[in-house]
Image (cartoon, rainbow, N blue to C red):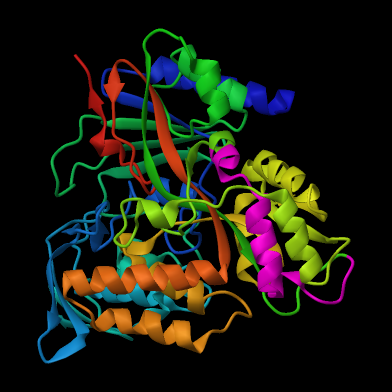
């Protein structure tokens, strides 16, 4: 952190301290929202802040239950299982405009359109239309037991306000202004320094205990821990293993930890890729992918990254997860070298390993493990949003990334694995995954999911490493339960007597 940034942050903390009262909460994070447009970025920093300002139709709870946010009820049409009917709650936007079906249709279509960060995930939605001011119909590509998980991530904007402010599409984003139905509204913002939110007096839900939020991005890990220890923030959201070490033993500081909806994994591009010393892509070879698997010590990586080792690309609270599927192979570098030789790489090969800046240290630990079997990984770091865009573009041959389960269901994860990996094709597996949509009997579904996961694991389409844990450190004066998706809502914070 430069001196100028440190001085600016110190000033922001001082201003926050001077304004702090009983109902004021100072919330520290490792980074800031990239934009205030709800459909322009999917990174965790942006979405966590905006889910306190805007609201979606529904929310998925751990275990798969669906709860309504702006939707009062929903039902798949009896005569058309691809059609979902939603009845809407009454709510008011921050500027006083009434929420209605037109806003939902506008927001979903905006999120589906080219240029939106959600366009790919929302492609399963074929159409959306208003039938009454308080009812909409959403047509989806395939029938399912629950509404599309992307509806829990599409935040609803006021159509009139967005159009009036020149933000009718995500290509002309509302980057520095907001108008949602959520529990908090934007008061002021100095990007990367300080954002102030105040309670929305028009909010349809219970009044929050926290009436003012000072959101403080603090990039330096050491300074984050000091800010909490010195009581300059009440809650620190991004608690890393290093933060925990720095906070250990500090009086009046508690840590709440829970399994996160985030899987750390190594991803591959199949077919032609960005290779370092060979025209072919070694990762196309299943023996090479098995060699990588046998070189990695998941327990070590999980301990280092702050999580639980896992060999299944599903969090522990998702249907289809089991201890057996999560169990890893014991690391065996000797066996891994034999597999590389059998695949035609007795001298190994070189490859770039793309990674987000926050995972740089973990990537270098993986690099050391791969080096022992003759795979020379050149770690290339990028900012989080840039890394995600690089992977999504198909430009990365080998990358360390994180994945969150949409809707806490195995079926979308399996579909993403089998049908969503660049260059990978397996018609038999695709057919097996597609058949899951028609299985409603619970026992039959459990058996089908287990078999599908076994087949996917044999292919090693990606290499799951660990389920992350999410931890919030906080002063004794407050308490909050971390959200598995990292979308902790400020209105769930409670002040302790």
Percent position of residue 477, x then y: 29, 16
Q: Is residue 291 above or below residue 223?
A: below
Is residue 481 one of those drawn in magenta? no
Which quadrant does the C terminus fall into? top left
Percent position of residue 189, x then y: 48, 40
Residue positioned most to the top: 251
Percent position of residue 356, x then y: 65, 50
Relative depth, front residue between 6 and 422: 422
**Measuring 25% from the left and 78% from the top, which residue is drawn there?**
144
Is residue 289 one of those drawn in magenta? yes
| Lateral position of residue 366 relative to residue 321, left or right | right
| Lateral position of residue 340 relative to residue 137, left or right | right
Q: Which quadrant would residue 136 be assigned to in this image?
A: bottom left
| Lateral position of residue 468 relative to residue 198, left or right | right
Percent position of residue 147, x then y: 24, 72
Which quadrant does the N terminus fall into? top right
Relative depth, front residue between 209 and 236: 236
**Measuring 24% from the left and 42% from the top, which residue is drawn there?**
200
Q: Is residue 488 above or below residue 39?
A: above
Magenta highlight range: 277-302
Residue positioned most to the bottom: 79
Prevailing secondary structure class for the magenta stretch in the rendered image: helix
**Measuring 61% from the left and 51% from the top, which residue is drawn there?**
384
- Total tally of numbered discs in the picture: 0
Answer yes or no: is residue 155 visible: no
């Amino acid at each position: 952190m430069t001196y100028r940034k440190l001085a600016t942050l110190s000033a922001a903390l001082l201003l926050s301290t001077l304004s702090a009262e009983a109902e004021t909460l100072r919330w520290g994070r490792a980074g800031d929202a990239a934009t205030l447009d709800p459909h322009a970025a999917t990174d965790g920093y942006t979405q966590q802040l905006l889910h306190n300002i805007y609201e979606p139709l529904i929310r998925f709870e751990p275990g798969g239950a669906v709860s309504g946010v702006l939707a009062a009820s929903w039902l798949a049409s009896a005569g058309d299982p691809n059609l979902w009917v939603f009845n809407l709650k009454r709510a008011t936007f921050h500027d006083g405009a009434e929420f209605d079906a037109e806003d939902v249709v506008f927001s979903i279509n905006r999120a589906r359109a080219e240029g939106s960060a959600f366009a790919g995930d929302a492609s399963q939605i074929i159409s959306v239309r208003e039938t009454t001011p308080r009812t909409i119909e959403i047509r989806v590509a395939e029938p399912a037991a629950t509404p599309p998980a992307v509806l829990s991530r599409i935040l609803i904007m006021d159509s009139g306000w967005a159009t009036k402010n020149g933000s009718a599409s995500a290509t002309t984003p509302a980057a520095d202004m907001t108008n949602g139905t959520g529990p908090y509204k934007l008061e002021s913002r100095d990007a990367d320094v300080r954002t102030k939110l105040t309670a929305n007096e028009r909010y349809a839900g219970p009044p929050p205990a926290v009436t003012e939020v000072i959101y403080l991005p603090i990039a330096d890990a050491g300074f984050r821990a000091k800010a909490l220890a010195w009581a300059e923030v009440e809650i620190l959201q991004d608690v890393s293993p290093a933060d925990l070490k720095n906070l250990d033993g500090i009086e009046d500081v508690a840590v709440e930890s829970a399994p996160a909806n985030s899987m750390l994994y190594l991803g591959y591009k199949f077919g032609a890729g960005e290779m370092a010393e060979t025209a072919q892509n070694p990762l196309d070879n299943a023996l090479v992918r098995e060699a990588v698997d046998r070189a990695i010590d998941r327990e070590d990586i999980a301990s280092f990254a702050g999580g639980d080792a896992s060999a299944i690309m599903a969090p522990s609270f998702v249907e289809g997860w089991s201890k057996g599927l999560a169990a890893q192979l014991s690391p065996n570098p000797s066996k891994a070298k034999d597999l590389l030789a059998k695949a035609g790489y007795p001298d190994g090969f070189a490859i770039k390993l793309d990674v987000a800046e926050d995972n740089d240290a973990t990537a270098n630990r993986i690099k050391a493990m791969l080096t022992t079997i003759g795979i020379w990984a050149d770690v290339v770091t990028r900012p989080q949003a840039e890394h995600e865009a690089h992977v999504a573009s198909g430009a990365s041959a080998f990358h360390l990334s994180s994945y969150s389960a949409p809707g806490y269901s195995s079926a979308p994860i399996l579909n993403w694995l089998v049908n969503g990996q660049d260059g990978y094709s397996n018609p038999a597996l695709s057919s097996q995954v597609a058949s899951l949509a028609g299985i409603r009997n619970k026992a039959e579904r459990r058996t089908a999911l287990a078999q599908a996961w076994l087949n996917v694991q044999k292919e090693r389409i990606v290499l799951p490493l660990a389920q992350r844990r999410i931890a919030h450190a906080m002063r004794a004066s407050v308490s909050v339960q971390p959200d598995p998706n990292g979308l902790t809502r400020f209105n769930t914070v409670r002040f302790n007597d």
